[in-house]
Image: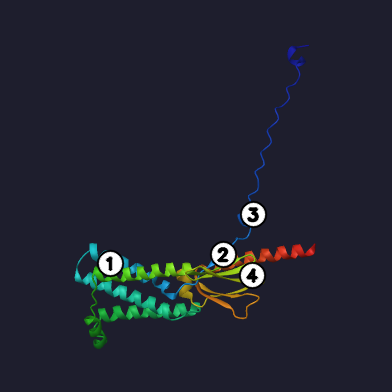
Amino acid sequence: MSEESASPAEEPTPKPEPIATPAPVDDDKQSGPPKSIFLVSYPKIVFLYPAWIASIAAGIYSAIASEQRGDTQLLALGFLVLLAINLVVLSFDFPRTTSLTLFALLVAVGIGLWFLFSSYPDIVPFVSGFIANLKPFANAAFYFIFAGFMGLVYVGVAISVKFDYWEIRPNELLHHHGFLSDLKRYSAPNLRIDKEINDVFEYLLLRSGRLILHPSQERRAIVLENVFFINHKEQAITKMLGSLQVRVRKDSEF
């Protein structure tokens, strides 16, 4: 009998078992509701920030770029058009998308007519003459003064909201107000909230809207205008109050 036949058969080497990868954990499910949510009502002047940014850009351009009078007039005209549009947004509400579309259409038609009368002055001589004589001018100092004044206003707004804001906790609603940090408490377990988006432009600019709070023991509703990122705030409040209601139901069963 040969040595090869006498040797025992070699057993196959077992393959290592694959390491099980843990399933991804959803952070939203793992993390609990927020401990507190802060709500701030801002004045409408915050929606003028496009004109404020435009004034800073126009001032820088006027200071370091070309000093030709034609470029300066075109820059001043563009700034005035942007400021006018921004003031319209600040003054009127556009509650539906159709109103937003109509406003954009009117602006496009106005700009188109402007270029039409400028290119073909014989169509309507009166209008063409008015446009030809309309030559606004503004230097870098004008833009920087406007931007500086708006900047001071925004600093004042940022300081004032530090002394007047609302805080929602799982069991209470707090109103912080006054320079001495006066505090007023409301019951929060039965708090109801309503969300309203009355202006499409304001929502597009800062995702803002109106929050209406209905505390259980108060007859009058609390209305907070121009709350930034209103959808995120509403979802956070709903999550907080919903988890509280679930805990109450569980405790009442025992």
Q: Secondary structure at mark 1?
A: helix
On the image, numbered disc 2 is attached to which residue? 37
Q: Amino acid at mark 3?
A: Gln
On the image, numbered disc 1 is attached to which residue? 59
Q: Residue at x 66, y 39 (%)?
A: 19
- Relative to 202, does residue 37 appear above or below in the rendering? above
On the image, numbered disc 4 is attached to which residue? 188
- Marks 3 and 2, how far apart in space? 19 Å
- Left or right for 6, reference 168: right
Callout 2 crowding tier (Cα within 10 Å): few <14, some 14–19, many ≥20: some
- Marks 3 and 1, how far apart in space? 50 Å
Mark sitting earlier along the chain (3/1): 3
On the image, numbered disc 3 is attached to which residue? 30
Q: Residue at x 23, y 70 (%)?
A: 139
Residue 22 coordinates in the image, percent (x, y): 65, 45
Q: Quadrant of residue 119?
A: bottom left
Quadrant of the image containing the N terminus: top right
